[in-house]
Image: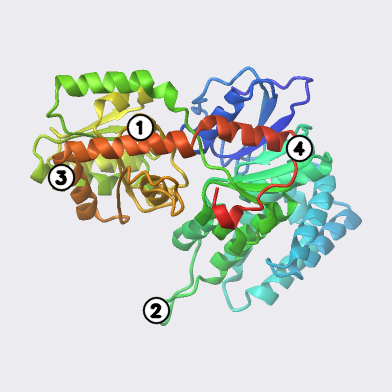
Amino acid sequence: MSRPATTTTPEVCLLVEGTYPYVAGGVSTWVHQIITALPDLSFSVFFIGSEKSPTAKYKYQLPANVTRVDEIYLHDPITAPPRRQARGEDAAAVHQAIRQLLSHAPDDPAAAGALDDLSTKVACLARRVSFDNFWRATGTWQLIQEIYHQYAEGGSFLDFYWSLRSLVEPVWRLMSSVLQVPPARVYHSLCTGYAGFVGGLAARHHNATFLLSEHGIYVRERIADLQKARWIHDPPILRPGLLQRPTLLRRVWIAFFELLGRFAYQSARRITTLFVRNAGFQIELGAPPDKLEIIPNGVHPPDFDQLRATRNALIAQNPEREVVGFLGRVVSIKDVKTLLRAARLTVDQRPAAQFLIAGPLDEEPAYAAACQELSRNLGLENHVQFLGPQQRDDLLPAIDIMLLTSFSEGLPFVILEAFAAAIPCVSTDVGSCRELIEGRANEQPPLGPAGLVAPVGKAELIASALIRLLRDRPLATRMGEAGRTRATAHYARDGVVQRYRELYCGEGVIGKELLVNGY
C-alpha cells in the first residue's frame, strides 16, 4: 500500500500521526492541499500509527511529487527474531540518560536536551538489542524500582510497572526508528506528540530544518483524553471531590506528553498555528513566542463558482426547500448525537426540514451505529439521511445551511468550503469557529456574521439558530455572501500556500506581529 522508496532525496518530509493518507478531512485535507499546490517540491510522508489494520486503505491518490511513504506502528507485535542481550555498559548509558532526564521538571528547558541525549543513546542500543531484552536487564529493573519509590510509592506497583512499560515501549520504537527516517532538507510535523518528537530528532540527525504546525493543540487534546481514559487503572477515591486531581498514573502520562510538546517547540525553527487563541495555548505550553506565526487554512473561492451556480439553480427550482447539511466523519468528537437532538427540535418547528449527514461511518462504527439508532428513536426516519462518504461538490448544492456540532475543532475546512459556496453556517463555539463566522475583532472592513454560533452540547440553542435561518431566507442569503467575501479576503489558498513555500525555502524572520495584528 505504501509508495516504494526512491533514491531521490525529498525536499520536505511531512510527519503525520494517524492522519494522511489513511484518514480524510481535517489535517489530511491540509496535507493533500499543500503537496498538490507545490508540485515543484518533492515530499515524503512519515506516517505514525497505533496498530496496522489489514483493511486500511489510502483515502487519497498520492500526488506525483510524493516520492515515498514510510510507516511505523507503535503497538504492533514485534515479529523480528530476538536480538542479543544488552551489554552492561550500553544499557547503563541509557539508564543514566533516563536518570538525567528525570532530574529535570517537564517545563525545564534542559529537559529537551536530556531527552535528545537519551534518544541518541537508545537509537544506538536499539539497533542491536530488542526492547524486551532491555526491559529484562538487571539495571532496568533497578531503575524501575527507583522511579517507583521516588514518584509512586504507596500506589500499586503492578499498575505502575505495566503503565510505565506501555509508556516506554512505543517511545523506544520511535527512538530506534529515527535513523530510518529518510533524509530531507526540511522536516515538517503536523503536531507535537510522537510525530513532533521524531521530527525534531530526525532534523538534528540529518542537520536539517524542523518546522512544526498545529491545527489543534495536541497536548491539550491528549490531556482531555487521559482525564477520561478507562485503560488507566485508578485506585479507589476515599473522599471524592468536585476538583479531584488526576491520579498518579494519569499525571505521569500528562507530564510525558507535556515533555514531548516542549521538546518539539524547542526543536522547531518555526511554529505555525491556525488562529490567535491557539497561539496563546502554545505559549502557555512552552512555545517561544518569537517562533510563532499564524497561518490559517485556505480555500480558493473561484473553484466554487460553478457549484454556486448549480446551487442557485436548484434553489430557484425549489425555493421552499429547507435542507441542513453536515459534512464530516461520524465520530464522537463531532457530537453527531447532539446534532440529531437539535434536528428533532428543529423538525418540531419546521416540519419540512431535512438533514443530510455526509461522511464515513466506519471510523467509529459503534458510535455511528448508536447515532443511527438514536435517529430512529427520535422518529427522524423521514428527516435525516446518513449518506456515507460524499463528494463536496455533490453535497453543497443540495443544502441551505452547513451545521457543525463538534466538541473540538481547529480551523475547519468544511466552514471555509461552505463560505466559498456562499452557504451560511451554524457551529458550536470551538476552535476558530466563532472567529470565522463573526469575523476577527479588527476585521476591515467589517463584513458581518456569516452564520450563528451556539454553545457545545446545547441542542436547543443549536436548533434555535437553525430555525432562525430557515425562517428567514434573506438573512441566510446575506450571511452566506458575507462568508464568501470573508473567505476571499482573509482565507485565500494562494496566500497560505505561498507562506509555506517561503518557510520551506528558508525565508527569514517571521511572526513579529503575532500578538499585535493577529494575522
Q: Is residue 370 above or below residue 505?
A: below
Q: Dot 1: what SS?
A: loop
Nearer the observer, disc 2 or disc 4? 4
Which residue is denoted by mark 4 in the rendering?
506
Around disc 1, counting alpha carbons within 10 Å, would you say few (fewer than 14), some (14 to 19), or many (20 or more)? many
Q: Are marks 2 and 3 in contact (CB under 8 Å)?
A: no
Residue type at mark 3 is: Thr
What label does residue 484 carry, if any?
A: none
User: Looking at the rendering, in which quadrant would you find the N terminus?
Assistant: top right
Asked if the residue at tag 1 contacts the one at tag 3, i.e. Cβ–Cβ closer than 8 Å, the answer is no
Q: Which residue is the site of mark 1?
A: 359
Depth check: give the residue in front, 426 or 106: 426
The circle on residue 346 is 3
- Amino acid marked by disc 2: Pro
Disc 1 or 4, which lies upstream in sequence? 1
Residue at (55% x, 39% y) in the render: 18
Task: Tell me the CA gap for discs 2 and 3.
Answer: 39 Å
**Pointer 2 residue:** 240
Q: CA distance from mark 2 to mark 4?
A: 54 Å
Q: Secondary structure at mark 4?
A: loop
Earlier along the polypeptide chain: callout 3 or callout 1?
Answer: 3
**In the image, residue 360 above or below residue 6:** below
Q: Out of 213 and 280, give the one closest to the viewer.
A: 280
| Callout 4 amino acid | Gly
Label 4: few (<14), some (14–19) or many (≥20) C-alpha neighbours in 10 Å:
few
| Residue sitting at x 61%, y 27% | 35
Q: Position of residue 216 (x, y in %)?
A: 52, 49
For marks 2 and 1, give the CA distance.
41 Å
The quarter holding residue 73 reads top right
Front disc: 2 or 3 = 3
